[in-house]
Image (spheres, helix red, strand yellow):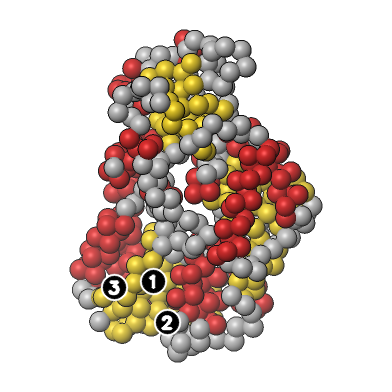
């Protein structure tokens, strides 16, 4: 079943990034042969007035859905009974007309339907309120008393396409699907009622919106977000640029991995590659690092990293380097530099399935350079954040890195994303982060 899901996602090349309207005879149908079996959206017969349109799957295409997946691809659909527009609520049935669930549809997306329930539900304010209440209750159980966390994680909270990150009194909201976009004003209203935030920022600048036929942009719909907001994690303070930072401003998914890294830092010279705003470095300093070297190719990010180090009273010897991680690691190796702890948390190297091979080569090269500057007995903490790269493939890249660097390493632990980014059984795309702790021996 997992292989089947991966295959289907490979066809998608990401979150639904092909537009289908009027293209049944174009190159898409040659690239995705199953599309030719679906009638054009214009030919679907309308259902009775006021009825919820019904999506009927082809025979055998219900197995993945019954196993917990929430996505229905265009080439799995036999027919749609009823007129539909992006974001409409639909009911889904199997080839024998057995009910499978309720979702929202986008005929412009290769991921045509995203399910929200196995029951017949009205996707309106009461339903959305209950879903968001459930998501917040989960975070309260996982992180009691915390005010900074991922409050809603899309499919994992049964709200496909909705991301809500809470940064103390500021919320960052991402709408990534037409179904969420339809209800975005209502969602903002619900979040305001529940959390009374000082500010709400819509970070609708993700390229995934293009795949849904949505425009890109950023806006502040409540309060002000011109200045970085201060948050606290594990007793440390950080400034987060919610409006202009990467993603929504901070990488909440690495919270637990940063804690582990802090436990390895005592007395070590630490190298933090792709440091962004310095969260890993601050944790390492709290863990007792002897010195810190942080590398990032963004000068504004490093400026905020320096402010975060200052905010936490870091007194370890610190050097911030604006540059490419590959080039700087190579330079440090040539100069004979040696570190007791090296952290690699690069951005996603695989933006599409076509880039996987290239991405794995990049991971192997980066880790080879890291291993080359890690002393015997030291550690490398290395991460992959692309769901397109499976864990086994990433581990194989690490094996190749060790071989090329002529360094032997043992695996201390293999970790994933923080608990506020839950993984749904049967929906492997919700598990995207791999963090491997290696000890050089």
In the picture, the quarter occupied by the N terminus is: top left
Which sits earlier in the primary sequence, circle 2 or circle 3?
Answer: 2
Residue 296 percent across, percent down from the top left: 50, 65
Disc 2, disc 3: CB below 8 Å? no
Relative to 179, is 302 above or below? below
* Up-down relation of residue 202 to residue 227 (above or below): above
- Left or right: where does residue 171 sit relative to residue 31? right
Residue under the image location 62 percent in, 17 percent down: 50
Task: Classify 10 Å Cα crowding around label 2: few (below 14), some (14-19), many (20 and above).
Answer: many
Q: Using the numbered discs, state the Cα–Cα distance from disc 2 to disc 3 in whole angstroms.
A: 14 Å
Check disc 2 and report its element: helix, strand or loop. loop
Callout 3 crowding tier (Cα within 10 Å): few <14, some 14–19, many ≥20? few
Q: Is residue 283 above or below residue 389?
A: below
Q: Residues within 10 Å of mark 1 (few under 14, many from 20)?
A: many
Please name the residue that numbered disc 1 is placed on: 381
| Labelled disc at residue 274 | none
Q: Which residue matches tag 2? A: 264
Q: Position of residue 274 (x, y in %)?
A: 47, 65
Q: Answer with the quarter of the image where residue 98 lies.
A: top left
Image point (50%, 26%), residue name: 91
Pointer 3: what residue? 411
Residue 210 horizontal side relative to residue 229, left or right: left
Nearer the observer, 303 or 278: 278
Tag count: 3
Indicate the secondary structure of the residue bearing disc 1. strand
- Residue 280 image point, x, y percent: 51, 72
For marks 2 and 1 on the same chain, the one whose residue lies earlier in the sequence: 2
Of the numbered discs 1 and 3, the one sitting upstream in the chain is 1
- The residue shown at (39%, 71%) is 381
Answer yes or no: is residue 265 visible.
yes
Marks 2 and 1 close (CB-CB < 8 Å) = yes
Image quarter of the C terminus: bottom left
């Amino acid at each position: 079943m997992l292989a089947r899901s991966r295959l289907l996602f490979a066809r998608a090349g990401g979150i639904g990034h092909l537009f289908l309207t009027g293209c049944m005879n174009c190159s898409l149908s040659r690239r995705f042969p199953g599309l030719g079996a679906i009638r054009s959206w214009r030919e679907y017969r309308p259902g009775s007035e006021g009825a919820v349109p019904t999506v009927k799957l082809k025979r055998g295409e219900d197995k993945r859905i019954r196993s917990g997946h929430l996505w229905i691809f265009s080439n799995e659909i036999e027919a749609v009974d009823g007129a539909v527009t992006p974001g409409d609520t639909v009911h889904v049935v199997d080839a024998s007309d057995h009910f499978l669930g309720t979702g929202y549809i986008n005929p412009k997306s290769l991921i045509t339907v995203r399910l929200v329930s196995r029951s017949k539900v009205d996707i309106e304010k009461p339903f959305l309120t209950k879903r968001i209440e459930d998501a917040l209750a989960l975070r309260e159980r996982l992180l009691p008393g915390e005010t900074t966390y991922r409050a809603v994680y899309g499919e994992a909270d049964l709200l496909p396409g909705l991301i809500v990150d809470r940064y103390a009194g500021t919320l960052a909201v991402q709408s990534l699907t037409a179904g969420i976009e339809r209800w975005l004003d209502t969602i903002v209203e619900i979040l305001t009622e529940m959390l009374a935030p000082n500010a709400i920022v819509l970070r609708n600048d993700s390229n995934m919106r293009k795949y849904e036929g949505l425009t890109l942009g950023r806006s502040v719909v409540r309060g002000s977000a011109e200045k970085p907001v201060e948050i606290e994690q594990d007793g440390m303070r950080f400034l987060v640029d919610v409006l202009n930072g990467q993603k929504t401003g901070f990488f909440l998914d690495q919270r637990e991995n940063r804690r582990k890294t802090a436990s390895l830092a005592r007395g070590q010279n630490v190298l933090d590659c792709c440091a962004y705003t310095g969260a890993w470095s601050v944790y390492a300093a709290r863990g007792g690092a002897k010195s810190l070297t942080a590398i990032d190719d963004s000068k504004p990010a490093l400026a905020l990293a320096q402010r975060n180090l200052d905010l936490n009273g870091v007194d370890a010897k610190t050097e911030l380097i604006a540059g490419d991680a590959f080039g700087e690691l190579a330079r440090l190796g040539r100069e004979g530099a040696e570190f007791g702890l090296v952290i690699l948390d690069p951005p996603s190297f695989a933006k599409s399935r076509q880039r996987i091979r290239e991405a794995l080569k990049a991971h192997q090269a980066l880790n080879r350079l890291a291993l080359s500057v890690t002393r015997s007995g030291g550690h490398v903490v290395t991460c992959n954040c692309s769901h397109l790269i499976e864990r086994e493939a990433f581990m194989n890249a690490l094996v190749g890195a060790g071989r090329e660097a002529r360094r032997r390493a043992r695996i201390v632990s293999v970790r994933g994303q923080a608990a506020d980014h839950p993984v749904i059984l049967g929906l492997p795309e919700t598990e995207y982060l791999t963090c491997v702790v290696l000890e050089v021996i």
